[in-house]
Amino acid sequence: MKIDIWSDFVCPFCYIGKRHLEEALGDREDVEVIFHSFELDPNGAIKHDEDIHQLIATKYGISYEQSKANNDSIGQTAAAAGLTYDFDNMKNTNSFTIHRLAQFAKEVGKGNEFVEAGMHAYFTDGAFLNDEETLVAIATSVDLDEKRTREIIHSQEYLAPVRVDETKAMELGIQGVPFFLIDDQYAVSGAQPVSAFENILAQVDAKNATSQQTLVTEDGANCKDDSCTI
């Protein structure tokens, strides 16, 4: 089985959906998981003076308290999946450079490990994903070459594969992430519950369908455009 996943490093539901899928897969060794680049906000700024709560409050015209409550709710969902989200220290930033590094990692067989390390750094450790030393630390934590990593950071290398992933997303009509494509047949949108992933995987295993389908439950939270870029 092959599972292609489109996600962004700053999408909270992407990390939750990733963990739910992993729990549903368990110890299976017959599944190839491939992550693809998707920028929620390609024109996003590198740095912001405001914290996450204020950025969201300003964007949606809500109070700071409402924004914080919404983020706390997402944090509770993450905690139920075994993740720790530190919203107070998250540093919103453009994700293009780390996507390029992810493409490099994928090329050398470290793509999935790099995605995990990058998401953990952002959501749990409050890492700034456009700081060179931070990016190098993430890369070397999964045994990527430090010198090569720095070269990529200071270039436009791996731009093409990022754009290829994003073009494929457009062709598939992907408007929000996470988005999962199983065996090029089953399209699953959003951070589905573990039970939903288990049901979908069972259907794929049983080969109950041969044409592309969209199998989505009601609770598939996701991020669309830059609507929950945090």
Image (cartoon, rainbow, N blue to C red):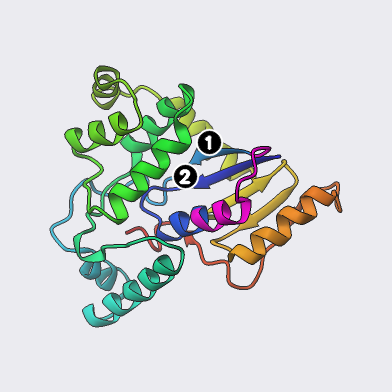
Q: Which mark is residue 38?
A: 2
- Mark 2 surroundings: few (<14), some (14-19) or many (≥20) residues within 10 A: many
Question: What amino acid does circle 2 point to?
Answer: Phe
Which residue, given by chain and number where applicable, does mark 1 sit on? 165
Q: Nearer the viewer, residue 230 or 196?
A: 196
Residue 167: horizontal and vertical position, in percent?
A: 55, 37
Whether residue 174 appears in this view of the structure is: no
Residue 204: horizontal and vertical position, in percent?
A: 78, 50
Q: Which residues are magenta?
A: 19-31
Q: Which mark is residue 4?
A: none
Q: Quadrant of residue 130?
A: top left
Whether residue 135 appears in this view of the structure is: yes
Q: Residue drawn at (29%, 76%), measured in percent from left and top?
A: 67
Residue 35: horizontal and vertical position, in percent?
A: 52, 39
- Mark 1 surroundings: few (<14), some (14-19) or many (≥20) residues within 10 A: some
Q: Residue drawn at (34%, 26%), measured in percent from left and top?
A: 143
Which part of the image, by quadrant, shows the C terminus?
bottom left
Q: Is residue 142 left or right of residue 181?
A: left
